[in-house]
Amino acid sequence: MKIAFYSAKSYDKESFDHFAQDFGHEITYFEAKLDKHSTSLAADHEVVCAFVNDILDKSVLKKLKDTGVKLIALRCAGYNQVDLEAAKDLEIPLVRVPVYSPEAVAEHGFALILTLSRKTHKAYNRVRESNFSLEGLTGFNLHGKTIGVIGTGAIGQAFCNIALGFGTQVLAYDLYENEELKSKGIRYADLNELFAQSDIISLHCPLTPETKHLINAKTIKQMKDGVVLINTSRGALIETKSVIKALKSKKIGYLGIDVYEQEEDLFFKNLSEEIIPDDQISRLMTFPNVLITGHQAFLTREALAQIAQTTLRNISEFEAGDPLTNAIA
Ligand code: NAI
């Protein structure tokens, strides 16, 4: 099938080109993000392949439908960027990649924690300038600490398994309890207990109307002083203004985020020569105890290969008229 591939980066091309021939699809890569201005690029293509910050609202979906697009293939797990009702009304099927190396994201969560807990980002810069002083580099052990994990699906489960290896106590919260994790010693608790008991809190639930701003002024108040907050899931799980306030008062001791509520206009672009108009991320970047990465938790060779293969297989199923294994209901 002919695929219009939006928001294409060099690493996407590399992994998709590697597998495309096996599936017999033809891909046109567009650097442009999918939004109301770029829908015309999809003319003559039957499939649109989109990523996390592409816009798939009602007007975009309508334009794609009018252009002749028959399938939207998301090359990501989350689908909060899609107006599902509009897609249903327009009868455009949607497929996604529900699981791709959950370990990639879980390991990145620990990269954020370890960088913050051992200040390796500071040590790296110091040593490069022949500054071998240890002043100000005192960290803390993970061993013996309590980690609260919100969402124990594929990524949360992988995260819990790593946490156990560090000798931490894991408190978990999810709508459904995972028996395998429980058999390994992970204890489920309600959110109130998790917030009150955890030294480190890591978010792995999807963004839904229920989870939007799960971390807000009220829930932060319930947390331990100096808590470490990690978000590799979706930016809007956190109410940024409350987190900034809590960083200023030292209620939050460390913040590690790979996602940000207003990331659509920032992430995946080189803005090093631009003035950043977003005052909240600019403020966050000034804190010495805040580590921000630009939605790279998924970015491993293993995950990219799985994303490409599953996306191309999803499209082949559609082409063959087979049931869509990874359809978004
Ligand atoms: P999953 O669907 O396997 O697991 C999500 C878990 O959250 C499920 O166990 C579900 O029951 C639970 N959940 C749903 N609503 C909840 C609520 N209100 N409170 C607590 N738990 C709730 O998803 P997976 O693969 O583990 O991904 C989790 C999230 O990670 C995705 O939604 C996505 O937003 C994010 N993600 C981030 C990436 C990155 O590069 N930073 C890459 C891939 C995913």
Image (spheres, helix red, strand yellow):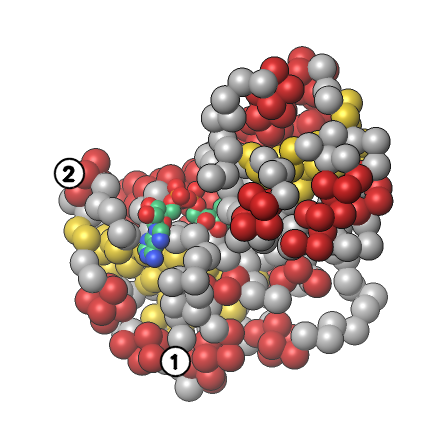
Can residue 35 be seen in this snapshot?
Answer: yes
**From what the image shows, is residue 175 above or below residue 253?**
above
Dot 1, crowdedness within 10 Å: few (<14), some or many (≥20)? some
Image spot of residue 210 (x, y percent): 38, 63
Disc count in the image?
2
Residue that protrudes farthest toward the bottom in the picture: 249
Q: CB at mark 2 closer than 8 A to ligand 1? A: no
Give the residue displayed 54% in from the left and 50% down from the top. Answer: 85
Nearer to me, 250 or 244: 244
Image spot of residue 253 (x, y percent): 40, 74
**From what the image shows, is residue 20 above or below residue 47?**
above
Nearer to me, 44 or 231: 44
Q: Amino acid at mark 2?
A: Ser
Res 87 quadrant in image: top right
Q: Nearer the viewer, mark 2 or mark 1?
A: 1
Task: Residue under label 2, please give it.
Answer: 183
* 245 relative position to 282: left or right: left
Q: CA distance from mark 2 to mark 1?
A: 34 Å
Can residue 11 be seen in this snapshot?
Answer: no
Q: Counting residues from the N terminus, which is met first, the one under dot 2 or under dot 1? A: 2
SS for callout 1:
helix
Nearer to me, 16 or 81: 81
Quarter of the figure with the N terminus? top right
Give the residue displayed 47% in from the left and 44% down from the top. Answer: 105
SS for callout 2:
helix
Give the residue displayed 77% in from the left and 26% down from the top. Answer: 2
| Residue 217, label in figure | 1
**From what the image shows, is residue 324 above or below residue 96?**
above
Image spot of residue 128 (x, y percent): 65, 58
Image spot of residue 206 (x, y percent): 43, 52
**From what the image shows, is residue 60 above or below residue 218?**
above
Give the residue displayed 54% in from the left and 48% down from the top. Answer: 84
